[in-house]
Amino acid sequence: MIQRLTILAPMTVLSIFGAAGNAFAGGRSEPWQMWLQPAASPVMERITEFHTLLFIIEVSIVILVLGLLCYIIVRFNAKANPVPTKTTHNTLLEVVWTGVPLLILIVIAVPSLKLLYYSDRIENAEMTLKVTGNQWFWSYSYPDHGGFEFDSVIVPDDELKVGQPRLLTVDNEVVLPAETNIRLLVTSADVIHDWAVPALGVKLDTVAGRINETWLRINKEGDYYGMCSELCGINHAFMPIHVKAVSKADFQAWVETANKKFARTGGPAPVRVAETGDPKGE
């Protein structure tokens, strides 16, 4: 039942607002989009279902309250009801308006907790990706594939190529295999950041001195974009995330190339400069 409502409710709303075409493009938000990005992971699929359930409950409550207000206005105005009732208590009504909200909260709480535990971690991960937030760029490490690391920095507007999205393009995208259970370990080198990719259902704070864990499984190949979702300083708006999902065979080929490209030389790490010209960490 919920799956049917998940399909019908968004389509109905989007058709009303005339935004159905934009809402089902993939990887990132589109102009005038009025619904969630298309789900590209099992977690996001469940988030979308839960969001739709909440949407239906909220709309039903609004319609009910609006109907009651209209009925009261018509039925109990001074002209239609010149002699007001002196009733002060109604046991049945009081039980109903206490019990119904309680039942609604239970209906919301059960799938909410199930989703929370489902998205928390995975027991049998096939690989691990470590994400480190910096002011103001991301660093990625592949401990299961040689341990190579690289930074991912935003590409300035004047260096963008045709077709590259502004404020979302980076010099080194995160390459991950599709249809693979991936453990994500996120931390920070300075302040609190937040690694968030809406289409993949991932949004987790990176905290210095602590490693938070979550997981993802990308349903299909493609490009998925996100941004830092925690106010982390002057260049907070210039920390995009670009996840490129490829086949397992292409991923293995990329790993071989990446091990050579990002091999450690033992020298000091270069100072990366963000869009405002400030060096990282300053």
Image (cartoon, helix red, strand yellow):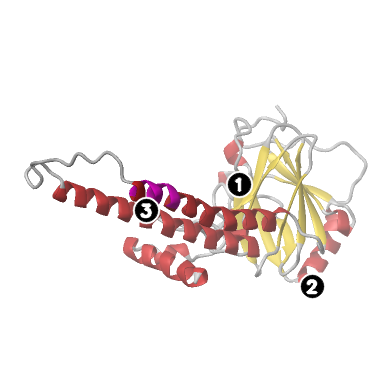
Q: Is residue 236 visible?
A: yes
Residue span colored magenta: 93-99
Magenta-drawn stretch, dominant element (helix, strand or loop): helix
Q: Is residue 63 left or right of residue 118?
A: left
Identify the image quadrant of residue 21.
bottom left
Q: CA distance from mark 1 to mark 3?
A: 34 Å
The amino acid on which the numbered mark 1 sits, given as a three-letter code, is Met
Q: Residues within 10 Å of mark 3 (few under 14, many from 20)?
A: few
Closer to us: 149 or 159 = 149
Q: CA distance from mark 2 to mark 3?
A: 50 Å
Q: Residue 61, which numbered label? A: 3
Name the residue rendered at 75%, 55% in the picture.
Answer: 121
Closer to us: 207 or 76 = 76
Which circle, 2 or 3, is nearer the viewer?
Answer: 3
Q: CA distance from mark 1 to mark 2?
A: 28 Å
Q: Residues within 10 Å of mark 1 (few under 14, many from 20)?
A: many
Identify the image quadrant of residue 59.
bottom left
Q: Which residue is mark 1?
A: 227
Q: Determine whether 267 is above or below 243 in the image.
A: above
Q: Are marks 2 and 3 in contact (CB under 8 Å)?
A: no
